[in-house]
Amino acid sequence: MASRTVEVTIRRVVGSGVLALLLTLSLGTLAMVALRAEGYGGLRAGDWAAVRFTVWQALLSAGISVICAVPIARALARRSFPGRSMLVTLLGAPFILPVIVGVLGLIAVFGRSGWINDGLTLLGLPNVSIYGAGGVILAHVFFNLPLATRLILQGWLSVPPGQFRLAASLGADGFALHRLIEWPMLKRSLPGAFLLIFLLCLTSFTVALAVGGGPRATTIELAVYQAFRFDFDIGKAATLGLIQIAICVCVAALAFLVPLPRVQGGSDVGVVPTWSRPSPLDWAWIGLGAAFLLVPLGAIVLSGLPGLWGLPSSIWSALWTSVWVAVLSALLCAAMALGLALMVARSADGVRKLAEGIGVLGLATSPLVIGTGLFLMIFPFARPMDFALVVTLTVNAVMSLPFALRVLAPAVAQVYSDHDRLRQSIGMPQGTWARYVVLPAVRRPLGFAMGLAAALSMGDLGVITLFADPAVETLPLALYRLMGAYRMDDAAGAALILVGFSLLLFWMFDRGGRGRA
Amino acid sequence: MKTVPFFFAGLMTATSVMADTPVLTVYTYDSFASDWGPGPAVEEAFEATCGCDLQIVPAGDGAALLARIQLEGARSDADVVLGLDTNLTAAAAATDLFAPHSVTADFAVPGGWDDPTFVPFDWGYFAFVGNAGADLPANFKALGDSDTKIVIQDPRSSTPGLGLLMWVKQAYGDDAPMIWENLADNVVTVTAGWSEAYGMFLEGEADMVLSYTTSPAYHIIAEEDMSKTFATFDEGHYMQIEVAGKLAGSDQPELADQFLNFMVTDAFQSIIPTTNWMFPAVTPASGLPDGFPMALPAEQSLIFAPEQAAAVRDDALAEWQAALSK
């Protein structure tokens, strides 16, 4: 009994530590900013318009991303074709692009002088415009559809193939199959995927502005920006930051109201189960999804190729910095996600949801508030720029945590529900249990989570701009600096390298997770 | 995993070695400090004369720079802040964090210079940059009446964006909202920063982009590309004057003065044109490089005094938002 208490305590301590870090980076940074403010910052009518626009576009963007992701993930789950695994990896690319690169890629295809409008002009048809609210949503779907697809695909692959085989042998197909197997699975995966994408769109700023066409597309994050640097009104920035978190809490509560049943039976498999009559629509969905996501990516590759030769040497040291920050960030993220998942594995549903809720808070907090708050925490004691990379990698890890938790928590809970009684009955030590039972069983989602964390970290400009040390630069920072110095060709080359290495890191972790399965 | 301790160890060694030489810390905007900006050359030139270690610290852009100084307050490590413009100097002076300067120079800034706190290091004219050979509008009204598509920056997040706001306000006063309504259908989009807008222009998304009269000089001098030009507006062009100031809380006040004096010498000023792509505040003996545009006559050089700029800013922003949100 004694050893069991110790084990439980260790899990609690690790898990609580992670939760404390998460709360520090979200509510803690916000509190620091609020404390630094001299008085409460009132909002203007324009700020409420920004709140309305932000929530509206985030709901639509997340809704459309998730709805479109279902048929694409379904098609990918049941179709096997050469290059499928490569396509699944590539589909992750838009999500990890630095926003400015992604926007330029989208514009090359959908813009006024983009490929689509060139084609329409050739055919004598009227042109389409990407700019406006529609463009904001299109861009957000472009960035987030791949994420939704991957999360939902993960859901499909977690359904034990036996269930499909059993259903098929009982003569269930079409609607029955959907109602018995697919719908319960979707009910588990959709709310979480929706919430994560909603939050990503909630703090969006550069994208919304670039294709929004004007001040109508003002988001809360821009209002935060304005408060900090135009009005020098820190109190107002804190108020806006609080509104972001309040919206997050409301939407999270709604999303989690949908019951999240425990994942049942079996573990992931690397093969694609084929369970129902092939539908030609599958190919249409795969083709459409791939074209929508990969053509703008192609534009980025094309515009980056000429710049690849003669890139300044500082790009390579920036790349090296970014790679090790990304790898450490992925390790930290995985450790935190595992710690949390282990802590809540046998807890009641409510506790699990609470932990997951705290996990997403970092994502809902304005990056500018996080950066400023951390700056204020460090400044009294040390030079913030000495912590540039430590802060960058920690914040990146925390930002990736919700995604990692999303895929890891169910897998860990599964291991416990399958084998915990056995462990208790033979008195397996905690270390052995973790190493020989838990880790192998969660290897695949762990690899995916780490790949995502590493790639996200590579592409994120993050908080480094506030902490910038003149001697240290990450690749996204180097890219922005090239653009700021008119060197758009070099910047395009750097963007191509960034995309390439982000994907490579993602692929390596993801591949490692799949292992020899 | 070895890299982190290694990284810290490296930092500590670096700090202890430099303990003997005085350190002058200059906060500036990111593109000044970057490898492509004036920063590295300025550091080398100043360190050759000062017997000190000049640390140039990037801190976002101009507005982020002031926000940073306000966050740090009197305990800031910074001795000098370089890169505020006259739209920000009133707010900067109001913080009482800056000390008066003692620099005298023959400033080439149109309209002269007599601010007691801030010293200009370069300046430029905002302008719409387009492709050579295109039909260029002669003023805001002609631009608004034409089909010319433009990309501009948001005044809330970008200094050129704020410059355009002030330009229209200075040129048209109470008629500014009318000008903006007329321009609304020419605006393709409003970006968060200069880089996005300029990138979109180079991609062909718009006929013109809000930038500087000196932008085509970059393409001419650095890329030997003559295809870019700017439209001369008969209302005149709004100026951006970029300044530096010494912090009152500096622990190296003499070194800071020395730096501000160095800033207006040829050694510093001759670096500016082809790294910051702006006009030097004091024209160096070598003159301006070939390919640089001419300065405009004084009556064409528009600018609000810092206090006026601070006073009209909020109303001008509200007008801009209202006109472009219709």
Image (cartoon, coloured by chain):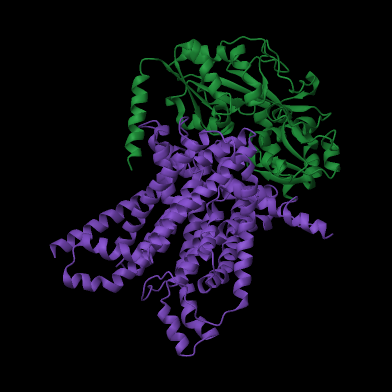
Q: Which chain: green?
A: B
* Along the viewing direction, whichever of B128 and B63 lies nearer the viewer: B128
* Along the viewing direction, whichever of A423 and A169 lies nearer the viewer: A169
Residue at 62 percent across and 25 percent down: it is: B275
From this view, report whether residue B321 is shown above or below residue A7.
above
Residue at 76 percent across and 20 percent down: it is: B295
Q: Quadrant of the N terminus of chain A?
A: bottom left
- Residue B30 appears in view: yes
User: In terms of image quadrants, where is residue A226?
Assistant: top right
Q: Quadrant of the C terminus of chain A?
A: bottom left
Viewed as shown, does residue B78 lie left or right of A277?
left
Which color was chain A given?
A: purple
From this view, report whether residue A56 is shown above or below residue A498.
below
Residue B192, percent from left and from top: 63, 42
- Residue A57 appears in view: no
From this view, report whether residue A20 is shown above or below residue B225.
below
